[in-house]
Image: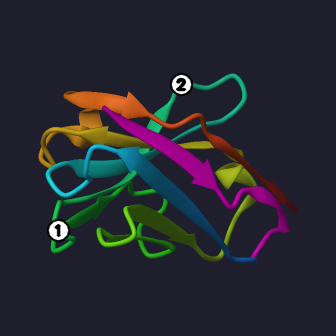
Amino acid sequence: QVQLEESGGGVVQAGDSLRLSCAASGRTLRFVAMGWFRQAPGEDREFVAAISWGGSSTSYSDSVKGRFTVSRDNAKRTVYLQMASLKAEDTAVYYCAAGDDYGTIATGEGIHVWGQGTLVTVSS
């Protein structure tokens, strides 16, 4: 069983940058794809970014492409989400997730575990 814990959320100004971390404990991360999702107040949870096991493949939602970067350090069992040029509409609780398949994680399929979330608030 893998446990995930996000950190790094906070209150920032529009245009600022922020880096989220997702630390895993329990079974190794090496064999799973990792994803970041977010849920804004009153909205459904949505896909943000995903990264394959080795980190060679990444994908992003159109709303964050070019501004967010996902990366992972398997030795540290940590996945990161570097967020730049933040906008008010990026305000949400951000969750990391561990899934079976990089190809489907964006849809929510095959996700075995979710973190508890970390709140990002972007003021305009």
Question: How far separated are the C-alphas under marks 1 and 2?
Answer: 26 Å
**Type of the residue with mark 2:** Asp
Residue designated by label 1: 57
Relative to 47, 53 lies left or right: left
In the displayed structure, 119 sits above or below 107; it is below
In the displayed structure, 86 sits above or below 47; it is below
Q: Is residue 14 magenta?
A: yes
Report the disc number at residue 44: 2
> Residue at horizontal 36%, vertical 31%?
113
Which quarter of the rendered picture does the N terminus lie within? top left
Which quarter of the rendered picture does the C terminus lie within? bottom right
The secondary element bearing badge 1 is classed as loop
> Residue at horizontal 72%, vertical 56%?
9
Which range of residues does the magenta coloring cover? 1-15
Q: Quadrant of residue 77?
A: bottom left
Relative to 7, 13 lies left or right: right
